[in-house]
Image (spheres, grey):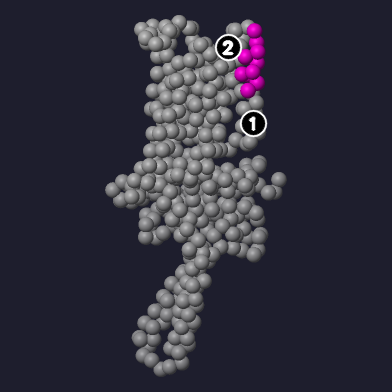
Amino acid sequence: MKRRKDGNARAEGRRIYPCTLALCFSALMIVAPASPPVAVMGAVLAGALFVFRSPLVAALAAAAAPVALWLPLLPPLPSLPPLSPLPPSPGFWSATALMACAALIPHRAIYFLMHLSQRITILCLALSTACLCVALLLPMERAAALLIVPANLFAALLGAILTRYLAFANARILGWDAQGLEAIVRNLLLGRITSGMLHDLAQPLNVISMANGNLSYIIEHIGIDPDKRAQIDERIRRISANTENAAAILSLFRWFGRGGNADYSLLNVRSALERAIAATRSNVRHADISVELAGDGLDHPLSRRHGTVEIMGVAALLCAFGGFLREDGSRIKGQVLLRADRSPAHILVTLHCMDEEGMATIDCHMDPATLWLIQQIALECDSEFHHRRRRGQTTRFTMRIARDDI
């Protein structure tokens, strides 16, 4: 049942919607030579198909569009009059070119659409409508045909923006390129459960710490063999160290994303990244990976955005550690470098993943739902969060943090 539900969600995003858009585009291109304004609707479909990340379907739709020019040469159907051949208009070719661009433009440009303001969306709608209206009102056919081209461009951008927003309104589409929404929802609910159990976990630690202190007091006041006393003291120190480590882990959970220090002067980029490293780096899974901090922006104060930077750092590190695991489950030794550089208006934090030879590791992947959520958190604090996926480059994530001291 689980596989069936995930399959239906993927089928809706991978096959049904893109194929429907491609068929509608082909139908519009058949009548576009006779009615050039129809090409504007085809441009909207081209922008929408670009968001659905189906380059093969977009390429087939773009290749099938010129076939409409050959339809008048075919023998007519008995019940329909013969079609007269018409020359293709600039609107026809521009819509076809936009569909071809939907198949060729890299998909990382999709995330750029979510950063566009509502003013850009309204501007695209207004400009496309104005160009279309002027094209319909002009008596000169050549000028009217040329105005269809900018109308198509703005219509394609509008279609991509609106489809991007609608895609995130449909919760199932958030699970594309991931293992479905179940894993994402499980992680979110696990965080809620963990926060509720912190108090219950802290009570046993307090009892263990008190019992360990009482045991140490008793050992000091009773006569016992020195060798046995040394062994018991070593065990007491070990219990105390493990209890303190567990309490530190609970503190990370309790204050995750909330600063965790009453003295705001001690909160800076370094402390936020150090807390992110402590919360994500496991000595069991990532013992062969060293995490280092560098750059002249580490000491920049973060009184307002400390929690946001910590959240962004945790998301980036969790994804980066996945790049050190091969498909067979074996680990890759390497280094994760978090570099914070100061600029006139921002603090730029870049995350680099390198193996022992300093080369780029396996490309890591962050599911679109988590990436979108982190980007929205960053935008609310006048910051940016980007996932870089370029071959041969060690940079995996960039975090641009706005400065408060300017």
Please tell me which residue is depicted at 66% across the width and 60% down the height of the picture. 264
Residue 137 in magenta stretch: yes
Task: Please determine whether, in this image, residue 65 is positioned above or below residue 266.
Answer: above
Labelled pair 2, 1 in contact (Cβ < 8 Å): no
Q: Is residue 7 left or right of residue 382?
A: left
Is any atom of residue 140 visible in this view? yes
Please tell me which residue is depicted at 63% across the width and 36% down the height of the picture. 118
What's the magenta bit mostly, secondary-structure-wise? helix
Query: Where does label 2 land, which residue?
Result: 145
Please tell me which residue is depicted at 46% across the width and 29% down the height of the picture. 49
Secondary structure, mark 1, is helix
Query: Where does label 1 land, which residue?
Result: 122
Q: Amino acid at mark 2?
A: Ala
Residue 47 in magenta stretch: no
Please tell me which residue lies in front, 307 or 23.
Answer: 23
Magenta part of the protein: which range? 129-139
Mark 2 → mark 1, Cα distance in angstroms = 24 Å
Could you tell me residue 309's position as x and y percent? 57, 52
